[in-house]
Image: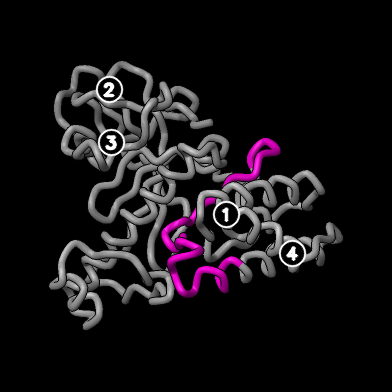
């Protein structure tokens, strides 16, 4: 569940209730400017703030990565409870190149031939398009899985290279990764159930590991979804699905929670067909 602004200490830059303009580290909520298809699936959780009078306040950074950084944002109307969300921001053209492998791109479409050429040539414009392409891909994957009942953060919106989603954690501290906890058979069962659900929908995560699975209040939540692929139409789909099985089985078995990778792969193939 998300954590609300009332649960957190107010940042020093927080607005007083009679202030009508954003202050330092604040902006007007971007929700009103987002087209409906770039907003999260309905029905939306009650904590999602849709008021055009709300402000987005930067609360700090959660983590940095090669391709994107994750920040905390509080969205709230002055004088009203708000919600804290994770803001994943993909790196732009002036930063390091986008390193997602082309094998994930098989079967995906860009918005124009010009964009496809620019991405292939790794021009500044192409890197900008690629960053936005991956943020939208992650938003769409997260939305689809959320609608199917998968344990993913609720995707609030995507705006260019910024993806806003439910924050999984306590206060301002993100939930630990599965790799940071002592796994149990229940954790394994949850991961296997998740993999079955993804396969039943025709997909493979493509990069599943204990490092992109969070554990919050006993619940395993999957994150980092931009590389999800159609397991059938993508020529690399079955190889990526098998790799997911090997990664999961190898780690759990090393942690003395054994699972057979090949048996798991066979089960998921049945879900696909």
Q: Do the residues labelled 1 and 2 touch (CB within 8 Å)?
A: no
Mark 2 vs mark 4, CA separation in Å: 46 Å
Q: Name the residue under label 1.
A: 199
Q: Name the residue under label 4.
A: 249
Q: Give the secondary structure at mark 3.
A: strand
Q: Of callouts 1 and 2, which one flags the residue occurring earlier in the amino acid sequence?
A: 2
Q: Mark 2 points at which residue?
A: 77
- Let me know if residue 204 is in the magenta part: no
Q: Mark 3 points at which residue?
A: 56
Q: Give the secondary structure at mark 4.
A: helix
Q: How many C-alpha atoms fall within 10 Å of the one at disc 4: few (<14), some, or many (≥20)?
A: many
Which label lies toward us, 1 or 4?
1
Q: Quadrant of the C terminus?
A: bottom right
Q: Give the secondary structure at mark 2.
A: loop
| Magenta residues (range) | 216-241
Q: In which quarter of the image is residue 101?
A: bottom left
Residue 92 place in picture, x, y as percent: 25, 66
């Amino acid at each position: 569940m998300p954590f609300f602004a009332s649960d957190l200490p107010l940042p020093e830059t927080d607005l007083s209730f009679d202030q009508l303009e954003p202050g330092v580290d604040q902006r007007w909520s971007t929700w009103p400017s987002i087209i409906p298809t770039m907003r999260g699936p309905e029905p939306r959780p009650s904590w999602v703030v849709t008021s055009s009078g709300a402000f987005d306040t930067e609360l700090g950074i959660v983590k940095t990565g090669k391709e994107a950084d994750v920040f905390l944002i509080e969205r709230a109307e002055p004088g009203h409870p708000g919600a804290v969300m994770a803001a994943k921001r993909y790196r732009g053209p002036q930063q390091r190149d986008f390193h997602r492998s082309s094998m994930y791109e098989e079967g995906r479409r860009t918005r124009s031939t010009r964009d496809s050429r620019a991405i292939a040539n790794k021009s500044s414009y192409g890197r900008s398009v690629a960053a936005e392409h991956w943020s939208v891909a992650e938003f769409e994957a997260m939305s689809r899985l959320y609608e199917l009942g998968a344990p993913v953060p609720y995707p609030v919106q995507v705006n260019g290279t910024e993806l806003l989603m439910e924050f999984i954690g306590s206060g301002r501290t993100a939930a630990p990764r599965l790799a940071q906890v002592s796994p149990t058979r229940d954790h394994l069962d949850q991961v296997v159930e998740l993999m079955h659900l993804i396969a039943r929908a025709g997909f493979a995560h493509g990069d599943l590991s204990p490092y992109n699975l969070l554990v919050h209040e006993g619940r395993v939540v999957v994150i980092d979804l931009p590389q999800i692929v159609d397991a059938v139409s993508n020529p690399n789909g079955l190889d990526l699905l098998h790799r997911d099985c090997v990664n999961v089985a190898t780690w759990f078995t090393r942690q003395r929670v054994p699972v057979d990778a090949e048996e798991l792969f066979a089960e998921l193939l049945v879900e696909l067909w």
